[in-house]
Structure formats: structure tokens, C-alpha cells
Image (cartoon, rainbow, N blue to C red):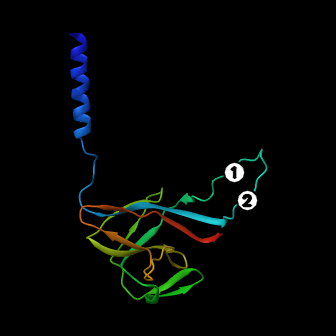
Amino acid sequence: MNQLLRILIAFAFTSIFFQCAPYQPEGQGVVGQVTWLEGNQMPMVLEEEKKAKDTNTGNPVKRTVRVYPLIKISDVTLENGLFQSVAAKPITEFETDENGRYSINLSPGRYSILTVEEEGLFASIFDGDGNIQPVTVKENEWTLLDIVVNYKAAY
């Protein structure tokens, strides 16, 4: 009898656990983290006693981020790895937290997301159609976009 009760309790907890859906925030948009990466990123052969430091991931950084309607490379001017002017007006602008994390509610559609740097705007992802840092937001879905600001890195 005791063993049967244990089995029923275990079955009940298992049923409840698998019926619970993970938390998903309301709406849709883009979520991610901004990191800073600079310096020599070339692979190196190290002596056995030296441990390799993982420098390819970058350090979380606070940044201002601008969301534009989807823009092409032909819509901007580029100087020293940064965009100096953009033909479109930004839809919105927001700040990441101290750890570079952000989430922004957006209507379904396609956007370009750029970080604001001291000497211009930055994006490092381009698709085959020449779109700059394209991201697609679908209804009731959150799109992950981690941004690595690496214009001062050497590969």
C-alpha cells in the first residue's frame, strides 16, 4: 500500500511538471546581449603550462542601441568600420543594462539594429541581399540577437 501511494504521488508530480509550459513574456521583439571585443583574435599556439584565456567571447558592455527599418549597405556611408550616416530615421533607441543585456518590444517585421559608438554606428552582420544586421520579428515570438562590437579587433 505504501509503495502504491509513492508511485501515485510520483506520477502526479511528473504529470504536473510536464504540463507546465515555460514562461514566455507577452508580445514579441528582440532580446540579446551586447559585448565588446578588441585586440588580436588570431589563434595562437601556447606552451602546455600556460592556459588559454577565452578572449573570443568579449566582455559585456553598456551601449545605446538604435532600431531602424531594414536598411541596405547602399543606404549608409561607411568610414573606418563605422557607419556615419543612415538614409532612414531610427524607429526607436534604447540602452542596454550594465551587463549588455536588452529586450525591446517590436511589432512583427524586419529591422536593422545598430549600436551607437563614439565615432559612428556599428553593425557586423550582413545578409546576402546587402541588408545590415537584419532581424525578423514574428508575432508572439522573441528573436535572439547577440551583438559583438568588434571593429577594434584583428582577425
Q: Earlier in the sequence, mark 2 or mark 1?
A: 2
Instruction: Say few, some or many: other residues with alpha carbon within 10 Å of mark 1 (under 14 / 14 to 19 / 20 or more).
Output: few
Query: What is the three-letter code of the residue carrying label 1?
Result: Ala
Q: In front: 12, or 61?
A: 12
Residue 112 place in picture, x, y as percent: 39, 76
Q: Which residue was labeled with disc 1?
A: 52
List x then y, in percent, for residue 61.
Answer: 52, 61
Residue 4 percent location from the top left of the image = 22, 15
Labels 2 and 1 touching (C-beta < 8 A)? yes
Q: Is residue 13 above or below residue 46?
A: above
- The quarter of the picture where residue 130 lies is bottom left
Relative to 28, say whether 2 is above or below. above
Given residues 17 and 147, the one toward you in this image is 17
What secondary structure is found at the residue carrying circle 2? loop
Residue at x 48%, y 56% (from the top left corner): 99
User: Horizontally, is 47 left or right of 52 in the view?
Assistant: right
Q: What amino acid is labelled 2 in the image? A: Met
User: Label 2, label 1: how many angstroms apart (C-alpha)?
Assistant: 9 Å
In terms of secondary structure, where does tag 1 sit? loop
Q: Residue 105 falls in which quadrant of the image?
A: bottom left
Label number found at residue 14: none
Q: Identify which residue is drawn at 44% across, 78% down.
A: 132
Residue visible at 43% across and 82% down? Answer: 129
Q: How many marks?
A: 2
State the residue position of label 2.
Answer: 44
